[in-house]
Image: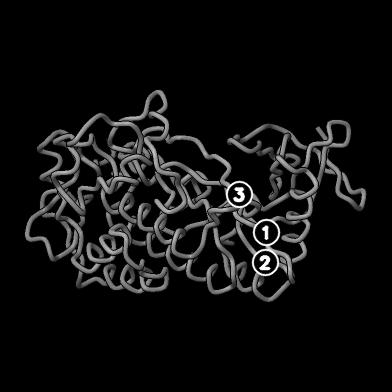
Amino acid sequence: MTVVSRGGREWLLTERIGAGSEGMVYAVGHGGSLVAKLVPDPADPVAFRRRVERLVRQRREPRAVRLLAGAPQRVAWPLAAVRVLRAGIEGYLMPDLRRDFLPFTALLTPAGRRDALPGTTWTTGLAAAGALARLLADLHAEGYVVGDLNPDNLWADAQGRVGMADVDSWQFTDGRDTFPGRMRTSGYTAPERMSPGPGPGPPAGEGVTGTGPRERRTPVAPAVPPDESTDVFALAVLVHQLLMGGLHPFAGHPADGAYLSLDDNVLHGRCRLLDRTSVVLPRSAPPADLLPRALDTLLRAAFDGGPRPPAAVWAEELAAARAPERITVCVERTTHVHTVERPWCPWCDQARRGTDSYPERA
């Protein structure tokens, strides 16, 4: 399949390497450094093309240049708007983050950490959480709102560095024009962006721990736009997952009824962190008290309905938690690393209950 830019330049797309609710991602050429995201059926093709073209132009503006500085590049910024001529499919080219990163989801399961990122410990999660918070703070400082921050548009490496894709769904301004956030993902959406109600049930394969397949991304109405605070809600969910062995903060079977969805738990404030009696979790879940007190406080503030700490504050506290004097290694297993604030190893406690979040590689 061939795509062409407005200027007439052509690129050959080879194998499909990813797919989501909006579109598909293809490799460009053979062994190149680019990929193409194609959106076969955007709700408004003209608006989508205009959005992408504005982002391509902004890549040379100071605010985007600052975000793209350094290596590895943290954002898969749109480089050129393209389309499949005969099919009329719109899309864009972007850097291939696979050159430097693995899918972020590898950090969220024991098997992913063991097999894809050997040597990963709790400090890797701290580093990734800090890198994500710093990236989000930088985006907010330049006037961008992610709007749909979730594991499927994130990437990470063994050092805990983080990359982000799906820039076309961000909310941003360009001159007098505002391009609103277009998507949301269940389990990563702040309650104020959701309509009250039970919501859909979990898809096949999703368990109450919140580490299985997620409910799908869906478009949102312009009347409920995202902002920096809603981004920080998603950041807090991801930080919790990174530091709690993949456990979603709103996972669990409701103590007051049937499990419907993560969104339903979010809307009703069912969260072990806020109220241990609100949900029932498997015995193998990580201990509730394994986090440093400062991070525990930030998480509670992000979820309790009050003002949420900004991403820059998260970045500072996560960096402080990584200081060598704040970390200790278990005497029994070197893969078990935890905060010095806890006098015994939380991961050994968890392993004795049936699951080891940081297993040694066989």
Disc 2, SS:
strand
Inter-mark Cα distance, 2 to 3: 14 Å
Residue assigned mark 2: 173
Inter-mark Cα distance, 1 to 3: 9 Å
Q: Amino acid at mark 2?
A: Thr
Q: Residue at x 60, y 56 (%)?
A: 170
Q: Residue at x 68, y 76 (%)?
A: 62
> Foreground residue, 335 or 154?
154
User: In the image, residue 212 lies at what x, y percent?
Assistant: 37, 33
Asked if the residues shown at circle 1 and circle 3 are in contact, with their CB atoms under 8 angstroms apart, the answer is no
Asked if the residues shown at circle 2 and circle 3 are in contact, with their CB atoms under 8 angstroms apart, the answer is no
User: In the image, residue 254 lies at what x, y percent?
Assistant: 22, 36
Residue 181, placed above or below residue 285: below
Disc 3, SS:
loop
Residue assigned mark 1: 179
User: In the image, residue 77 lies at what x, y percent?
Assistant: 66, 58
Numbered mark located on residue 106 in the image: none
361 horizontally vs 74: left or right = left
> Foreground residue, 219 or 96?
219
Crowd around label 1: few <14 · some 14–19 · many ≥20 (10 Å): some
Asked if the residues shown at circle 1 and circle 2 are in contact, with their CB atoms under 8 angstroms apart, the answer is yes
Q: Amino acid at mark 3?
A: Arg
User: If you read the primary sequence from the N terminus, does the residue marked by circle 2 or circle 3 appear first?
Assistant: 2
Residue 302: quarter of image: bottom left
Crowd around label 2: few <14 · some 14–19 · many ≥20 (10 Å): some
> Foreground residue, 256 or 274?
256
User: If you read the primary sequence from the N terminus, does the residue marked by circle 1 or circle 2 appear first?
Assistant: 2
Numbered mark located on residue 182 in the image: 3
